[in-house]
Image (cartoon, rainbow, N blue to C red):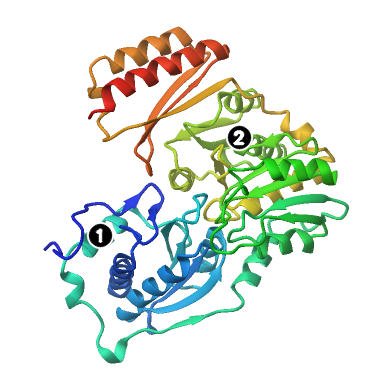
Amino acid sequence: MKNKSLPDKKKLFGTDGIRGKANRFPIRSDIVLRVGQAMGYLLRKNHKGKKAPMVLIGKDTRLSGYMLEQALASGLNSMGIWVQLTGPLPTPGIGFLARNMRVSAGVVISASHNFYQDNGIKLFDKEGFKVSREIEREIERLVFSDELNDLISSSNQVGRSRRIDDAAGRYIVHVKNAFPLDHTLDGFRIVLDCAHGACYKVAPKIFEELGAEVFVIGNEPNGYNINEEAGALCVEKMQEKVLKSKAHVGISLDGDGDRVIMADEKGELVNGDHILGICALSLQKKGELKNHTVVATSMSNMGLETMLKAKNIKLERTEVGDRNVVEHMKKNNITLGGEPSGHIIFLDQSTTGDGCIAALNVLAVMCSENKKLSELRSVVTPVPQVQTAIRIKQKSELSHIPGYSSLIHNIEKELENKGRVYVRYSGTEPVVRVLIEGENKTLIQNYADKISNFLRENLAGV
């Protein structure tokens, strides 16, 4: 039965958990409380231990995190779930601790790279992986029904919440273990941008404790400045600081620490495709690249695929989203995957994208091969790429639009095997994204304009 007191919405979860404007549906305290109750009910229902189920809740530094943390914990407590609050901690930290501390589940309150006005909720299972779509759909169903009102615990079974102090220390030790014991970062000068986010305390300690001289920026969160002119989506200050400090490398994390963009000693950017290429070649040389395969998404540049193929390494693509990458990796016994945006997954070291672990793996290659990052970066030569985004009123199946399929087919035919076309809807915005790659930048720009204009004409009024 539908709960008539709730908004007439059918969907909470997007491509990466629940996300939206803070204090607006669905990121409202009353909705988040019910998410906690729905999650708590499912955990209690499937729990087999003698003690009550335990859930870890972490968050980034945005203002609304306090409000949502309390609402979520309250919902879980009302279902008899005990809660441990870690405070600000990177998303991959909760994934690690959920498994390491043997709790029933983990939750991260974060909107990742978005500004402070937004917030979100990401759910992890006891193994540290994001929960399945089936669980998300069941939580969604329960939130919009009246069932929860009859499922809350009795007065003597209510759970309790407490803050834990050693979560950050555990995570720091875990991340440092990703760096080879026979190397240190002595002599390295590193610029580290923490995006005023969840990594502002832990990330500097990780690199400093390994011996690096660290120049930290973006480490003064005030609740409002997360990702503001800082972090993986705004790398200019990091690049400038690298040159000014004569650093060997720059590391720019996003607000929840699950992605990284780097810069070499010349200030040139090293994105997720570069990192995948650098690490894949290193692992292949050591005989440690499982199945000689890397997983990427449809957004990764053809230049990466071409280089890997020349080295007898296969690239398998998934739909956009680190969850899709991880699921494909788990299913096919592959340990390296990621996205050009900087979500890089080393599945034998982390259950989700981890910016610090990815950066340490690159630094390890620099140490073992005694090469500058600019040398390593050159292994991937990107093919010219054009991306555009068209705002729409409503999503419609693209293949059903008259003329769309023939337009794409004709462009792909003209590109032959020297380029590609990829069109998709955004999972978090009312936007359709167009990506075209090819040898001639002017030509692919014309193709992108042609597709964009077609979509504007046919989707603007849908």
203 w.r.t. 414: above or below: below
Whether residue 247 is visible here, answered yes or no, is no
Real-space Cα separation, disc 2 to disc 1, in angstroms: 35 Å
Q: Could you say which is closer to the camera, residue 90 or residue 360?
A: 90
Residue at (55, 41) in percent of width and height: 338
Question: Given the current orientation, which residue lies at the most extreme bottom position?
Answer: 156
Q: Quadrant of the C terminus?
A: top left
Query: What label sits on residue 222 in the rendered view?
Result: none
Question: Given the current orientation, which residue lies at the most extreme left position?
Answer: 1
Which quadrant of the view contains residue 411?
top left
Question: Given the current orientation, which residue lies at the most extreme top position?
Answer: 414
Residue at (76, 37) in percent of width and height: 267
User: Does residue 371 appear to the left or right of 20 in the view shown?
Assistant: right
Q: Could you say which is closer to the camera, residue 372 or residue 333?
A: 372
Please give the residue where the numbered disc 2 appears in the rendered image.
273
User: Does residue 89 appear to the left or right of 155 in the view shown?
Assistant: right
Residue at (47, 66) in percent of width and height: 65
Q: Could you say which is closer to the camera, residue 36 or residue 348?
A: 36
Please give the residue where the numbered disc 1 appears in the rendered image.
138
Q: Could you say which is closer to the camera, residue 90 or residue 233?
A: 233
Residue 352 percent coordinates (x, y): 52, 53
User: Does residue 406 appear to the left or right of 220 in the view shown?
Assistant: left
Give whichever of discs 2 and 1 has the lower sequence position: 1
Residue 47 percent coordinates (x, y): 33, 75
User: How packed is label 1: few (under 14 Cα within 10 Å), some, or many (20 or more)?
Assistant: few
Residue 48 percent coordinates (x, y): 34, 77
